[in-house]
Image: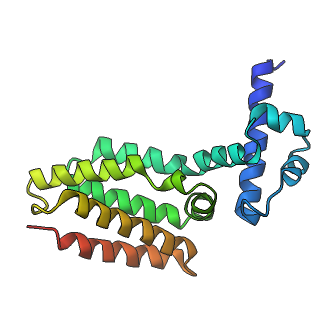
Amino acid sequence: MTSRKEQAERSRSRLVDAALRLFVEHGYEATSVSQILEATGMAKGALYHHFPGGKRELFGEAVEVADHAFHEGLDRIVETVDSPVGRITAGWKLVLDLATDPVFAKIVLVEAQAVAPEAWTGASQFQLLRATLEEAIAAGEIRPVPLDAATATLFGAIRRMADYVAVADDPGAAARDGDAVLHALLEGLRP
């Protein structure tokens, strides 16, 4: 016998899974609440019970699910890579690799940008990159440069490269090319 809490969590998960699949297939704007409900066999009241903000709140949860691997990977990099420059390169490699995944690409890079531009502009990621660049300068891995300008430039390059990979005909090749170009940019910051 399942508890109410377990039933509620299963219902919530069904809604998120169906919405995520439909958002990937059709995009946020072209996916209706009715389609989500039809895919789950659930009533409208169930959706609004779990997501009072409706479709937009449900989309936010879909972004969280699609973005989970990024946050896990970033945590792993921070915990295991000692060199600041090594963390920076591992971080962008993670982003580019994830950009080859259709779910991450569609939900996090394409749809989130259109629906909620603040969702992955990365205030926390920007600050982490800034702190890591500052650490790299202090360690002598990067020559002294204006920190905010360097952070904005590198963050923008990584983000745009992820966008490029997400829509490329051959995402794997685009990710490899992007990695090579980002390495070339970073070399220009070396002492």
Instruction: State which quadrant residue 152 falls in.
Output: bottom left
Q: Residue at x 51, y 49 (%)?
A: 69
Q: Is residue 7 above or below residue 145?
A: above
Point out residue 70 in the picture as x, y percentages from the top left corner: 47, 51
What colour scheme was applied to this rendering of the protein? rainbow
Q: Residue at x 64, y 46 (%)?
A: 60
Q: Is residue 144 above or below residue 42?
A: below
Q: Residue at x 74, y 47 (%)?
A: 17
- Image quarter where the C terminus lies is bottom left
Q: Is residue 71 above or below residue 181?
A: above
Left/right placement of residue 18 relative to residue 67 reads right
Point out residue 128 in the picture as x, y percentages from the top left corner: 32, 48
Point out residue 179 in the picture as x, y percentages from the top left corner: 35, 72
Instruction: State which quadrant residue 64 falls in.
Output: top right
Left/right placement of residue 128 relative to residue 64 reads left
Q: Is residue 28 above or below residue 79?
A: below
